[in-house]
Amino acid sequence: MSSQPLLSLENLSAHYVSQQGTRVVRAVDDVTLSVAAGGTLGIVGESGSGKSTLALTILRLLPPAARIVSGRMMFEGENLLDKSDEEMRRVRGKRIAMILQDPMASLNPLFSIGNQVGEPLRVHERASRANAWERAVALLKSVRIASPETRVSQFPHEMSGGMRQRIVGAIGISCEPRLLIADEPTTSLDLTIQAQYLNLLRDLQREHGLALIFITHNLGIVAKMCDQLAVMYAGRVVEQGPVSRIFSAPAHPYTKALLGSIPRMTDNREHLTAIEGQPPDLSSLPPGCAFAPRCPMAFARCRAEAPPEAAIDEGRTARCWLAVPGAGAKAEMNRSAVA
Amino acid sequence: MAVTTPPLAATAAADVSPTAFWRLKGFPLIPVMILLFIAFVAVFADVLAPHDPQVGSLARRFRPPFWQEGGSMTYLLGTDHVGRDVLSRLIFGARVSMIVGITAVLVAGGIGTLLGIVSGYLGGWADQVVMRITDTWLALPALTFAIFLAAIVGPSELNIIVILGLVYWTRYARVIRGEVLSLKQREFVRLAIVAGCSKRVIMWRHILPNVINSAVVLATLMLGVVIVTEASLSFLGVGVPPPKPAWGLMMADGKKGLMVGYWWLTVLPGLCIMLMVLSANLLGDWLRVKLDPQLRQL
Amino acid sequence: MKQYILRRVGYSLLSMFLLSLVIFLFVRVTGDPVSLLVEPGASPEDIENMRRQFGLDQPLWVQYWHFMASLATGDLGQSFYYRTPVLELYFQRLPNSLLLASVAMTLSLLIGIPSGILAAVRVDGFWDSAGKIFALLGLSLPSFWVGLVLILFFSVYLGWLPSSGSGTPLHLLMPAFTLGWYFAAAHMRLTRSSMLEVLGSEYIKLARLKGLPEALVIGKHALKNALIPVITLAGINLVVMINVAVVVETVFAWPGIGRLLYEGITFRDFPIVQGVVVIGGAMIVLVNLFVDILYALIDPRIRLES
C-alpha cells in the first residue's frame, strides 16, 4: 500500500487576468496541500480567501478569465494538469465529485430527481435508463431520504432544503468517487438540519472510503469533521496541519485570531473579538505578508517580504516569519529591546 | 467552462469585435455623424436640393441614376414616375422623417414619462388605471393601431405625429414607472417625504430628474421604431400624404417601376431609412450602456 | 392552479372589454363617425337613415351597448365594397395569413434559435458578433424594403420567384422570409440572452461538475430552460405576425388579412378596418391567455403553486 496521498497540490497558482492584461488577481497563490485516501481536509478562510476558487481549480472548471499559472495537481499519481479536456471531463463526477453550496440552485428545476441523480451513472458508466433509475432510488435511500420510490419522480421544488442538499450529496457519490469536495455544504441549511447532514456525510465517507475536502468558514464544522486543516488567506495557505494540534496551539496569527474570535460558553469576556481591518484587495496585494496590515504581531520584515511556508513540526507548516527560526528571534529581540 | 492548457502566461488578448468599428473608444462616432448629417440636410434642404421636389415633368420620368446608362448629372439619382428629381425628394424626405420622428418621440415621451411618474409614484387607483390602459394599448401591435387611427382621422403630417405619439407612449410609461418604483425606495425621496414636501413637488423636483436618463435612452431607441412605422404608414398610403416627399411614400410610388427594373426608386429611400434607423439604434445602445446599466435588459 | 387560470381569464376579459371601449371611443369621438360608417357616395337621406340606424343621435353609452351587443353576436358590420359581412371576409382570408405566418415563424425560429444559441455559447466570438449585427439589421431594415429588394433580385433580375400572388410554395418563399426577418432577429436576441442567463446558473455548474459532456450540458440542461421564454414569445408573435403582415402582404399581393386591411384603407371601407383591428386585438389577448396557461401547465414549478 502506498502512503502516497490521494490528492497532492504542489505550488499551485491560478490567476484571473483582466481583458487588457492589466489587473491580475492571484486567486490561488502557491498552494501546497495534500489529502490522504479516506482522510478529511478542511479548508477554512474568509470570503475572497480563494477557497472556492481552489476547488474549481482542482476540477479545472475555472471561468475563461482565469488561468492556472503554475504548479502541479497530482491525483492518484497523475498530474491533472496534463490531462486533455475530455480526460478531465471523465474525472469529474466519477473520480472527483463536488457538492455546491446552494442546493436549490444546483438542481435543474425542469428535470425529475431521478433523472438528475441517475445522470452521472448514464454518462460515466453507460447505465441504461432503467438501471440508472433503480440505482437513483438506492442512492436516495443511502442518503436517508424517506420513501425514495416516490421522491425519485418528483421535482426539486417539491423538496425541502435539507432534502435537496442530500440529493446533491447523492449525485456526488453516485459514481463512487475517491474524493468529494464539499463547498460550504451546510451554509444554506437550518441549524437543526446541519448536524444531521454532517453526520450523513461522515457515514457516507466511512461506507464508501471517500476522501473529503470541506470548504467552510465555520471552524465548528472543521472541529467536528476534519482531521487535517488548511487555513487560507488572500489566496495563500497560511497554516496547515492536523486539526487537533492547530486548535490547541495555532502558529499563524490569523489562525489564532480566527480561533480567538469564536465566542465560547466558558468565556468571561465582555467583548467579542473581531479581527481588525478589512480583507485584502486581491488585485493589489502589499509586497510582504498579505496579513501584515491586520496582524498584531507584525514586524518590519513581514511588511517587506512575503514569508515562505515554514515547517513547524511533523506535518505542520505556517506561512509566517514567526515560524521561521531566526526571523522570529529578531522580533523577540526587538520587542524585548523596546520593553 | 474548462480551462485548457495549464502553465500559461497570464495575459489574454482582448477581442476586437466588429462593432468596435463603429465605436472609436466607445463613442459611436459614425452613427452620430450620420444623424447629424441627416439633421443638417433636413434643416438646409431648401438650399441643398438641386430641384423642386414636387415639380416633375413627364418627359423626364424614370431616368436612372447618373452612373447608369441614360442617367445624367442633372438628376444625380434619377427621377421618379412623374419626373421628379429623386435626390431632391430624398433631401426633403429627410426633413419629413426628422420632423415626424423627433416630434412623435417627444410627444410619446412626454405623455409616457408623465404618466409613468404619476402612476409609479402615486400608486393606488391611478396606477391601476394607467396600467390597465397600457396593457390594453400594448395588446394591439403598434402598426395595426396606427393604421386604425390613421384611417379614422385621415392622413396628414400633424395627424401622423399625434397618432405615433398616442401609439408609443405606453412603452415609455411602462419603463419609467418601473424606474420610479425603485426610486421611491431611495433615501432622498424618503427624506423629502419626511420633510413634508408635497407629492407634486417630489415628483417634479426629485423623481423627474432621475428618470430623465432612462427617458433619453428610450427616446433614441424609439426614434428608429417610430421612423420605420411612419415609413410603413406612408408606404401603405395612410401616412404623410402626397405630394410631400416622405421616404415611405417614395417607396410606394417606386413599386410601380420595380417590375421593369427601376430599382433606384425603392432601394435608395430604403437605404436612407436604414441609415437613419441604424444610427439611432446604435446611438441608443451606446447611451443605454453609458447612462444606465440597469436598462440593459431593454 | 385553478385560481391562477381563473384570475388570468378574468384579466383577459377585462383587457378585451377595455380594447373594445377604446376602439369604440376612437371611432365615435374623433372626427365625424358618419363619414366612416357610411358608404362614400351615399345620398343625404341614406346618411340620415344610417345615422338613426347606428344610433348616432343617441347617448354614448347606448351606442356602446349596441356596439358590444353586435360584437357579441359576431356582427362586425358589412363591407361596402364586398357587400359581405366583415366576419365572413375575415375568415375567408385567415387561412392564407395563417399559412404565411406559420412558415414565417418556422423560418424565424430556424434562423433565430440556433444563432442565438451559438452566440451565447461563444460569447464575444465570431458568431456572437455576427449575431449582434444580424439583430441590429433586423431591427433597422423596414420589412417592406427587404421585401422589395428581394423582389428586385429574385423576380426582376433573376426571374426565379414570382413577385406576387399565391398558389405555389414558390409564391410563399419571399413573403415568408420578409415577414420572418424581423422576428428572426428578435428571437435570436431573446434566445441569446436567455441562454446566457441559464449558462450562468448553478445547475449548469453542477452539470459540468458531474462530468457531463458539453453537448449534454448545453443541449439538455441549458436548452430546455432557456427556450421557455423564447417559445412563449414565439407563440404570441405568431398572432402578432398575422396582424403586422399588412405591409408584407401588400408588397407581395398575398391574399391574407393584411391585404384585406390594406384594401379597407385604400377603398375607405371602414367596416373592414374596424373589424380587422377588433378581431386582431381579441386574438392577441386570447393568445396571451393561452400561452400563459400553457406555460403554467408545462413548467412544473407553477403547477403546484396555488
Image: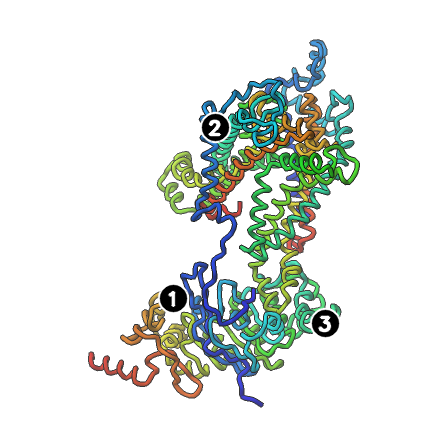
The residue drawn where x is 72% and y is 40% is C173
Secondary structure under the numbered disc 3 in the rendered image: loop
Q: Position of residue C16 (x, y in %)?
A: 66, 34
Q: CA distance from mark 1 to mark 3?
A: 47 Å
Task: Tell which of A149 and B163 is nearer to you.
Answer: B163
Q: CA distance from mark 3 to mark 2?
A: 71 Å
Q: Nearer the viewer, mark 3 or mark 2?
A: 2
Q: Chain of mark 2?
A: B
Secondary structure under the numbered disc 2 in the rendered image: helix
The kind of residue tagged 1 is Pro
Instruction: Say which quadrant the C terminus of chain A sits in.
Output: bottom left
Q: Position of residue A297 (x, y in %)?
A: 30, 76
- Find disc 2 in the rendering and name its residue: B42
Asked if both marks, 3 and 2, belong to the same chain, the answer given is no
The kind of residue tagged 3 is Ala
- Find disc 3 in the rendering and name its residue: A127
The residue drawn where x is 51% and y is 71% is B6
- Find disc 1 in the rendering and name its residue: A279
The quarter of the displayed image where residue C209 is located? bottom right
The residue drawn where x is 49% and y is 54% is B16
Q: Chain of mark 3?
A: A
Density class for disc 3 (Cα within 10 Å; few <14, some 14-19, many ≥20) is some
* Label of residue B4 in the image: none
Instruction: Say which quadrant the N terminus of chain A sits in.
Output: bottom right
Q: Position of residue C76 (x, y in %)?
A: 73, 26
